[in-house]
Amino acid sequence: MGCWSAENATKAYLKTIKMGNNDKEPNVAEFISALSAGKNAQVMVVACATAAGSPTLGLVAAAHQTGGRVICIVRGEEELHTSIDTLGCNASGVEFVVGEPQTLLLSEYRNADLVVIDCNLENREEILQVVQLSAGMRKTNTTVLGYNAFCKDSWQWGGSKTQFLPIGDGLLMTTIAAKVDHSGGENVGTGKRSRWIVKVDKCTGEEHVFRVRSSHGSAIIKA
């Protein structure tokens, strides 16, 4: 039997872990995939507290559309091997790194345009601060997502303007603006944001995710 596509693997994985939940509610992997693909993300980094799971599968699915890279940072060899086993054949689309996310995001991956952080990480706010500090090194805005947001006290994320999305075990989303270009080129720090709208067909239960350029925040809307 051949390797499933990332999209099919994502759906199968979530069907397994979300049995009994409302099928009409958007799930983490599908939302992250739609967000990443809509942003045309090229460098996608996920920092995991344990093994890689559905958020990483969502990034892999998006990478098939954008041609971008998916980097998964884990804490140790045990998490690395568990992640590879969990992702199966989709692990081939992921660059695994063992190390400290805050260090790696300031060096090798400072140009990441999408960063996904497990809120179960004790240093989650420190990782977010590193992404904020490295804004001057980037030419594009960086979207930061926190999953497992219902855990602990991760609601505010150090005072950042963060949107809470009731998807899965909770998602936090914030955009960190890149350095404003004062040299006469394109101003990438204008503060414009993407408003994400999720509409659900009442008859079929099918979800449609739209990205709308707006000066306002993000929103989840159900038809």
Image (cartoon, rainbow, N blue to C red):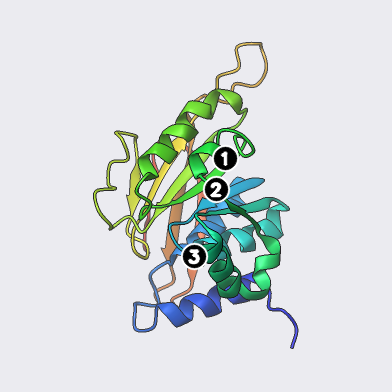
Q: Amino acid at mark 1?
A: Leu
Residue 51: numbered disc: 3
> In the image, residue 24 lies at what x, y percent?
39, 74
List the residue tagged with mark 2.
99
Q: Are marks 1 and 2 in contact (CB under 8 Å)?
A: yes
Q: Amino acid at mark 3?
A: Ala
Q: Earlier in the sequence, mark 1 or mark 2?
A: 2
Q: Are marks 3 and 1 in contact (CB under 8 Å)?
A: no
Secondary structure, mark 3, is loop
List the residue tagged with mark 1.
104
Q: Which one is in front, 134 or 198? A: 134
Secondary structure, mark 2, is loop
Q: Residue at x 68, y 51 (%)?
A: 69
> In the image, residue 218 lies at what x, y percent?
40, 45
Q: Residue at x 33, y 55 (%)?
A: 149
Residue 20: numbered disc: none
Give the residue furthest to the bottom: 1
> In the image, residue 166 lies at what x, y percent?
32, 59
What distance separates the C-alpha of mark 2 from that of mark 3? 14 Å
Residue 174 visible in the displayed image: yes
Closest to the camera, between mark 2 and mark 3, is 2
Q: Earlier in the sequence, mark 3 or mark 1?
A: 3
Q: Which one is in front, 213 or 97? A: 97
Q: Amino acid at mark 2?
A: Gly
